Amino acid sequence: MNKKTLPLLASALALAGALSGCIVATEPVAVVPAGVTYVTPVGMAPGAGYSWRYYPQRGWGWWHPRHGWHGGWHRR
């Protein structure tokens, strides 16, 4: 092995080791309570990270883990 390639290899291994701890979280599957009909969302989500969920008092709507519920509700 060449003396010039050894630092490059070491830095590549260090970078690979640092990035190997990344976690890719999948979106949880929406659990619909018994007796509630699943409603397919109409249109696009209001932004990245929103998921289609059921709220017992308001019906179906868009929910974000950081921003909470979106104002547009779909009662069906």
Image (spheres, helix red, strand yellow):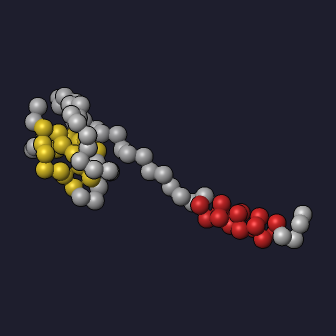
- Whether 11 is drawn above or below 57: the answer is below
Q: In which quarter of the image is the C terminus?
A: top left
Residue 39: percent from left, percent from top: 20, 31
Using residue 22 as the reference point, say whether residue 37 is left or right of it: left
Q: Residue drawn at (59%, 61%), measured in percent from left and top?
A: 19
Image height check: is 47 above or below 30?
below
Q: In this view, does 44 lie above or below 21?
A: above
User: Residue 61's quadrant in the figure?
Assistant: top left
For this rendering, which residue is in front, 35 or 44? 44
Viewer-proximal residue among 58 and 51: 51
Q: Which residue is drawn at 70% across and 63% down?
A: 12
Residue 29 appears in the picture as rendered: yes
Count the marks.
0
User: Which quarter of the rendering shows the N terminus?
Assistant: bottom right
Say which residue appears at 18% left-offset and 50% top-offset.
70
* Coordinates of residue 53 in the picture (x, y in percent): 23, 42
30 in relation to 47, above or below: above
Give percent across and percent down for residue 10: 75, 67
Side (left or right) of 35 relative to 12: left
Residue farthest toward the right in the current orientation of the protein: 1
Residue found farthest to the front: 4
Whether residue 34 is visible: no
Residue at position x 26%, y 44% in the image: 45
